[in-house]
Amino acid sequence: MTMGLGFFIYRIIITLSAFYGVYSYKRLDKSYKALVVLLVLSCVKELVDKYVYNTFPDGNYLNHLLLTSALILNLLIYLPQWGENRKLKRGAVVITLIVFILSILNTIYIQNLQVNPTNGLVLLCLQMVGFSLFSFKIIINSPANVAIYSKPLFWLSVSNLFFYTVVYLVFAFYHFFKDVGDIGDWIPILAVLSNYILYTGYGITIYVHKNKLNV
């Protein structure tokens, strides 16, 4: 599979998930409405990215905008699903506030709007891995009268945990692996495949949540 075909398939997946989210929007809880907003922003960014880059070749404005939006939207997605666990919620708010401020400082002093915000993306990875692990703890401690695959929080957290762990490892070890035989050639492919899993998982999450509400 060529990278061109891989990105084409990726855009199809994210577009279909975004359209399904918009179609289901009115029937979703607030958490999953926030997920749809994140999906739509990500989809629009991917669809117009090439045009914006050709128009403003010296800027990475969309990446910075999507990053800061994702940091806030992820909090809105997860927070309402953690029940009455106030300690966990306060911790999540503090974590998000810290990474948000660090991301803004990174944009101002280190990686400005002309540079891809890779440092901010690492912060986003840490936020999402943490939120996903917190959610698994809640799922494990919740009543077992509902199958785990019937819980939208499970699909959401599995998708996020896999994707953001892969992205974090790619950023952390890219300079090491890129010169190790054929491993470096697999890094872009792994990144694309992880995007497939993330946005397919988001579509499944919305589907499971909508069906749960219809029960």
Image (cartoon, helix red, strand yellow):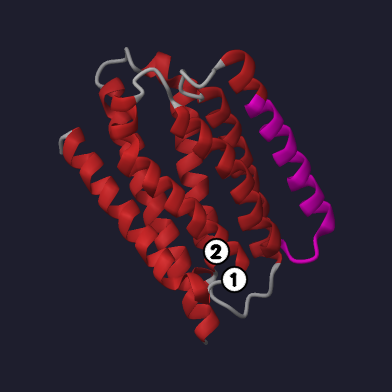
Q: For this view, does 117 lie left or right of residue 197?
A: right
Instruction: Left or right? Give the position of 35 relative to 140.
Output: left
Residue 178 appears in the figure: yes
Marks 2 and 1, how far apart at CA = 6 Å
Q: Which residue sits furthest bottom?
A: 215
Residue 144: horizontal and vertical position, in percent? 63, 75
Residue 26: x, y in percent? 51, 74
Task: Please name the residue shown 47% across and 64% down the image.
Answer: 205
Above or below 58: residue 127? below
* Chief SS of the magenta region: helix
The residue tagged with tag 1: helix, strand or loop? loop
How many labels were placed on the picture?
Answer: 2
Q: Is disc 2 in contact with disc 1, using a CB cutoff of under 8 Å?
A: yes
Q: Which residues are magenta?
A: 82-104
Left or right: where does residue 46 sit relative to residue 212? left
Q: Residue at x 37, y 56 (%)?
A: 200
Q: Residue at x 66, y 50 (%)?
A: 75
Would you name the residue on which mark 1 appears? 29
- Spot occupied by residue 122 in the image (x, y as percentages of width and height): 56, 29
The amino acid marked with disc number 2 is Lys
Q: In the structure shown, which secondary structural element does the residue marked by tag 2 occupy?
A: helix
Magenta segment includes 179: no
How crowded pointer 1 is (Cα within 10 Å; few <14, some 14-19, many 20+) is rated as some
- Which of the numbered marks, if any, corresponds to residue 33? 2
Q: Where does residue 174 sit, x and y in percent of width and height?
A: 41, 20
Considering only vertical position in the picture, is 36 above or below 192? below
Which amino acid type corresponds to the residue marked 1 in the rendered image? Answer: Asp
Residue sitting at x 15%, y 39%: 1
**Neighbours of disc 2 within 10 Å: few (<14), some (14-19), many (20+):** many
Q: Which mark is residue 171?
A: none
